[in-house]
Amino acid sequence: MDLIFASHNENKVKEIRAILPKWLTILSLNDIDFQQEIEETGSTLEENAQIKAETIFKRTGKNVFADDSGLFVDALNGAPGVFSARYAGTGNSQDNIEELLQELKNHSDRKAEFRAVFCVIWKGELSFLSGKVEGEILSESKGLEGFGYDPVFVPTGYSQTFAEMNPEEKNKISHRYHAVQKLINHLENLAS
Ligand code: ITT
């Protein structure tokens, strides 16, 4: 089964491909040569996931899903949240991490969670699926794997950041892993 994944983020593409079963293959926006940036004007992960999925559905008429995700930090009232990709204003991950550590400097509460919301459009019908993982924000970066805020996020029950773990380990517990499991169940139900 083929599904378009409405994303330009090759890190997300790689993670999702590593989690999916063989019967389900995805084509990213780079694979279908859709280079245009999709403006994310929503104020929630759901709204932005819907904007991305609908843009591609309207262009291609094909079955599609989008992932809008972010890091929600308790002491910052949920920031950077929906603005995670552009928290520092530059779109650069290192700058985003520095901004986050600066904002959290005087906070002892380091609790945070990653959330992912998928919007799926299957034969024109919309559905939303989500996943999350709880953890804590360190005061310095550790590790080189992954992307985004992975170097400062330690999932609950673990001692390493996502960026210190093997990608396989992150992919067994991440917010994206949980959303992908729901996507697989959803597609199995639609196909049966
Ligand atoms: P697309 O919209 O093209 O899919 P994007 O990177 O712009 O790519 P989002 O708007 O959903 O995607 O922003 C998600 C941001 O949240 C991402 O750029 C990271 O900063 C952060 N993020 C999400 N999942 C993450 C993860 O697994 N590890 C680290 N950071 C993550």
Image (spheres, rainbow, N blue to C red):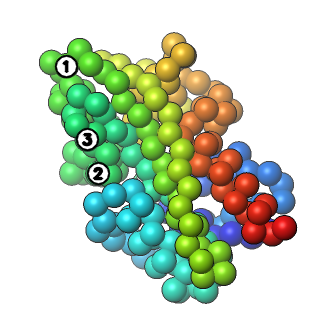
Q: Earlier in the sequence, mark 2 or mark 1?
A: 2
Mark 1 → mark 3, Cα distance in angstroms: 14 Å
Q: How far across and how far down the image is residue 59, in percent? A: 53, 86
- The reply to whether dot 2 and dot 1 touch (C-beta < 8 Å) is no
Q: Which residue is mark 3?
A: 79
**Pointer 1 residue:** 107
* Residue 115 image point, x, y percent: 45, 44
Q: In the image, 35: left or right of 178?
A: left
Asked whether the viewer can see residue 167, the reply is no
| Label 1 residue SS | loop
Q: Quadrant of residue 141?
A: top left
Pointers 2 and 3 in contact (C-beta within 8 Å)? yes
Image height check: is 170 above or below 127?
above
Tell me what residue is drawn at x 69 percent, y 64 percent.
26
Q: What residue is at 64 percent from the left and 37 percent from the top?
A: 171
Callout 2: helix, strand or loop? helix
Which three-letter amino acid code belongs to the residue tagged 1? His
Q: CA distance from mark 2 to mark 3?
A: 8 Å
Tell whether 22 sits left or right of 49. Answer: right
The type of residue carrying mark 3 is Ala
Front residue of this view, candidates 180 and 26: 180
The label number, if any, that marks residue 83 in the structure image:
2
